[in-house]
Amino acid sequence: MTPEQIALVQQSFAQVLPIREQAAQIFYERLFALDPSLRPLFKGDLRAQGAKLMSALTFVVGALHKLDTILEEVRMLARRHVGYGVQENHYALVGSALLGTLEEAFGPDFTPAQSAAWGAAYQALAGAMMAAARDMQQAA
Ligand code: HEM
């Protein structure tokens, strides 16, 4: 990611934070519309899960300029996701739901440059998580 893309993601995420509960709700609606078979993987309360997701995103977005320093946390998150039944192909669906949520939340204010920057940020995060999950499954 370029420094400009990191700044675009950080600025737009700051605008999402005040509406994070609605954003999380839109996100899960979009995710389950894309693939209803994902719904049973979520065993707990979705509002609480949405809050956890937003706090994890806050952590990652804040560290986009130094992703190497949070790599171990990201890898542990990925390993826990294997236990939740998450598979590699699910990451693309979550990426689509995330981008769709941002488009819906921002409307025409969501620029192509912002969309590309979020796509790159999600790719960096999901790529690290998928690699960690693969390493874990190969070692097993
Ligand atoms: C790529 C970025 C992602 C982030 C930042 C993220 C974040 C989180 C966080 C913070 C939790 C709370 C539990 C924990 O910390 O272990 C969680 C749980 C969970 N996530 Fe993710 N996640 C991501 C991707 C995914 C994907 C691709 C799926 C696939 C559907 C998924 C499905 C789940 C499920 C099923 C749970 C457990 C929910 C429950 O027990 O009710 N996540 N996630």
Image: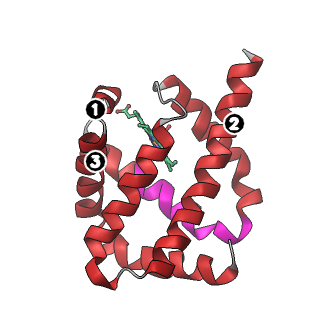
Quadrant where the image shows the N terminus: bottom right
Ligand 1: quadrant of the figure: top left
Q: Which residues are magenta?
A: 53-66
Residue kind at label 3, given as amino acid type: Tyr
On whether ligand 1 comes within 8 Å of the CB at mark 1, the answer is: no
Above or below, 86 against 139 in this view is below
Could you tell me which secondary element the residue under label 2 belongs to? helix
CA distance separating discs 2 and 1: 23 Å
The residue at which mark 1 appears reads as: 39
Q: Which mark is residue 67?
A: none
Could you tell me which secondary element the residue under label 1 belongs to? helix
Quadrant where the image shows the C terminus: top right
The residue at which mark 3 appears reads as: 28
Residue kind at label 2, given as amino acid type: Ala
Left or right of 59, for residue 49: left
Magenta span includes 115? no
Q: Earlier in the sequence, mark 2 or mark 1?
A: 1
The percent coordinates of residue 106 (x first, y second) are 30, 77
Residue visible at 77% across and 58% down? Answer: 68
Q: Residues within 10 Å of mark 2 (few under 14, many from 20)?
A: many
Q: Nearer the viewer, residue 125 or 116?
A: 116
The residue at which mark 2 appears reads as: 132
Residue kind at label 1, given as amino acid type: Arg
Q: Using the rendered view, name the quadrant where residue 72 is placed.
A: top right
The percent coordinates of residue 135 (x first, y second) are 74, 29
Could you tell me which secondary element the residue under label 3 belongs to? helix
Does residue 54 appear in this view?
Answer: yes
Residue visible at 52% across and 72% down? Answer: 116
